[in-house]
Image (cartoon, helix red, strand yellow):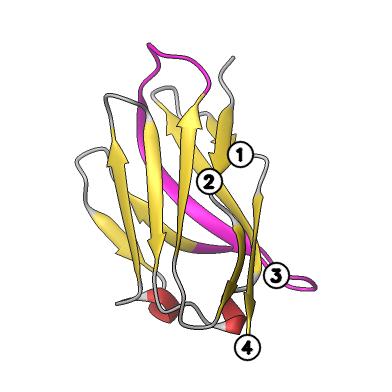
C-alpha cells in the first residue's frame, strides 16, 4: 500500500504565498492524474487543481492565475504553488492521486490559514 504525505501548509497573511507538496511514501509506484482538493469548515470538499500524467493542468475558477500545480513523476510528487492568497483560501488542503489500477489515494490533509 502507498501513502501520500503532504507538507507546506501554515499561516500566512493575505497576499502571501505558500507551496504545498505531496509525495508518495514509497518508490516504484506510478500515478495517473494527481490533484489538490480543499475543504473549508462547513463546506464540501472541492477540487482546486488537477494535473494529468502528461502534465496538463486544470484549475478551479477561483484560483486561476494565482495557483500553479506541477508534478515530478520521478519523485511521485505533486506541488501546489499558491500566490496572492486570500482569506477565502483558508481550508484543509488534501492531495489525491489515482493509481494505474484506478485506485484513489488521499493525503492526510494540511491546514492553510490566510489572515486578512
- For mark 2, give the secondary structure: strand
**Residue behind mark 3:** 40
Instruction: Judge by depth and name the residue closer to the eye, 70 or 19.
Output: 19
Q: CA distance from mark 3 to mark 1?
A: 16 Å
For the point 22% across and 52% down, which residue is it? 56
Ranked by sequence position, the earlier of labels 3 and 1 is 3
Pointer 4 residue: 116
C-alpha distance separating marks 4 and 1: 28 Å
Label 3, label 2: how many angstroms apart (C-alpha)? Answer: 15 Å
The answer to whether mark 1 and mark 2 are in CB contact below 8 A is yes
The image shows residue 5, relative to residue 67, as above or below, that is above
Mark 3 vs 2, N-terminal side: 3
Residue nearest the viewer, comparing 104 with 41? 41
Q: Residue furthest top?
A: 28
Q: Earlier in the sequence, mark 1 or mark 2?
A: 2
Residue 45 within the magenta-colored segment of the rendering? yes
The image position of residue 64, as x and y in percent, is 34, 76
In the picture, measured across the screen, residue 70 lies left or right of residue 16, that is left
Q: Which residue is mark 2?
A: 95
Amino acid at each position: 500500500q502507498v501513502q501520500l504525505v503532504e507538507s507546506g501548509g501554515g499561516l500566512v497573511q493575505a497576499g502571501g504565498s505558500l507551496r504545498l507538496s505531496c509525495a508518495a511514501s514509497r518508490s516504484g509506484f506510478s500515478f495517473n492524474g494527481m490533484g489538490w482538493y480543499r475543504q473549508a469548515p462547513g463546506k464540501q470538499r472541492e477540487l482546486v487543481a488537477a494535473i494529468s500524467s502528461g502534465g496538463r493542468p486544470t484549475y478551479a475558477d477561483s484560483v486561476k492565475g494565482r495557483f500553479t500545480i506541477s508534478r515530478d513523476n520521478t519523485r511521485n510528487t505533486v506541488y501546489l504553488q499558491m500566490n496572492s492568497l486570500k482569506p477565502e483560501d483558508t481550508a484543509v488542503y488534501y492531495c489525491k492521486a489515482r493509481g494505474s489500477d484506478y485506485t484513489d489515494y488521499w493525503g492526510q490533509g494540511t491546514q492553510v490559514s490566510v489572515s486578512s
